[in-house]
Amino acid sequence: MGGFTLRGTRPLNARQLYFVKPRQVEIREQQLPSLQPDQVLVKNLYSNISAGTEMLVYRGQLPDDMALDESLAAFEKQRINYPLQYGYACVGLIEEAGKDVDAACVGKTVFSFQPHASHHVCSMDAVIPLPEGIDSKEAVFLANMETAVNLVQDGNPRLGERVVALGQGIVGLLVSSVLAEFPLAGLYAVESIEGRRALSGQAGAHGTFSPDSDFDINALQEKLKLKEAYGGADVVFELTGSPAALNLAIDLCAYSGRIVVGSWYGTKSAQINLGERFHRNRMTLVSSQVSTIAPELSGRWDKPRRFSVAWDIIKKCQPAQFISHSLPFDQADEAYRLLDESPQDTTQIIFDYQDLS
């Protein structure tokens, strides 16, 4: 088994990331609980920072009257009170297995929805083995790719439609990658950061436009045939994290079009114009969140089926191309400060644990 231990009972300290107050993180050493019969010990290789949700935690912009994510066992009943752990995209190696777990799992590479840490203990049912042919750095995008698949399913794009994605952060880029598989009349992205506009083309967008340029917005309106009968975007995905972007979504949306809201705004709010175009054009605002399956799909789809699709798209689009920084876990403070102060220099930051013992 090389460096792996089977059915071990030795105590182990893990290095864990804590958000201790707004704009302050610490790495603390904590002893992990004893391994239970149905559990495994995982040593992480990489974990993925969710720039949207985690920056709300980092900046203190989460509502304080709700749980972090009741759909994930790692955060069950955990309220939003500092200090707290967060993160939900880890890839690592199973080092130990409880007595009720098949010994063959030891040494396997798995994905898990766990906070950032060097090691974690969880139920074997809570890890997802990597399919053959998927690299660990690609696998760390599983949670975000599942989100992208869910968003596209909720938007339900159809043959020949015009689609706009507002925001080309990592989720926006993955949504563009999924939409590029569809026979659309046009796939357009709106993004304020120049470097991300370039990546959007790699993801498959037919054109990318700056929301800060009147010339660009006019050009996008021409692409959407907005001033013509039956013009406008059939589907608009709002993925910027800024509620004010909903006004642009309404401006670009067609009669009876769908606006899919994939952003989580936390405590942020903005004045939205629901008069004029929205009121007269029968637009639909769709709330999209990955924790559940859309009711109209739940009779045929479950989480394993959606994960299977996400793995297939990861193989096709190779999202590791969007990693801008791979930082040692010890540099966590630098990672969050970079995301907070210099978002124009980042696309996706991941933590690398391989130098930790």
Image (cartoon, rainbow, N blue to C red):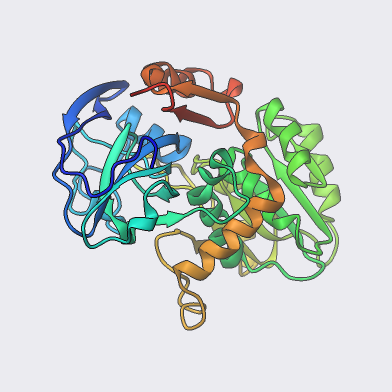
Task: Describe residue 42's horizontal placement relative to residue 254 as left or right.
Answer: left
Residue occupying image coordinates x 66% and y 28%: 193
Percent x, y of residue 156: 64, 69
Percent x, y of residue 84: 22, 35
Task: Describe residue 323's horizontal placement relative to residue 45 as left or right.
Answer: right
In the current view of this chain or complex, which residue is farthest to the front?
A: 1
Percent x, y of residue 99: 21, 58
The foreground one among 198 and 215 is 198
Percent x, y of residue 104: 38, 57
Q: Is residue 285 visible?
A: no
Residue occupying image coordinates x 70% and y 26%: 195
Q: Is residue 337 visible?
A: yes
Q: Quadrant of residue 270?
A: top left
The relative height of residue 146 versus residue 348 in the rendered view (above or below) is below
Residue occupying image coordinates x 29% and y 31%: 60
Q: Quadrant of residue 11?
A: top left
Task: Describe residue 212's horizontal placement relative to residue 8 as left or right.
Answer: right
The foreground one among 56 and 248 is 56
Where is the N terminus found, in terms of image quarters?
top left
In the current view of this chain or complex, which residue is farthest to the bottom?
A: 299
The foreground one among 209 and 92 is 92
Where is the C terminus found, in terms of image quarters?
top left
User: Across the whole image, how many numbered discs are drawn on residues?
Assistant: 0
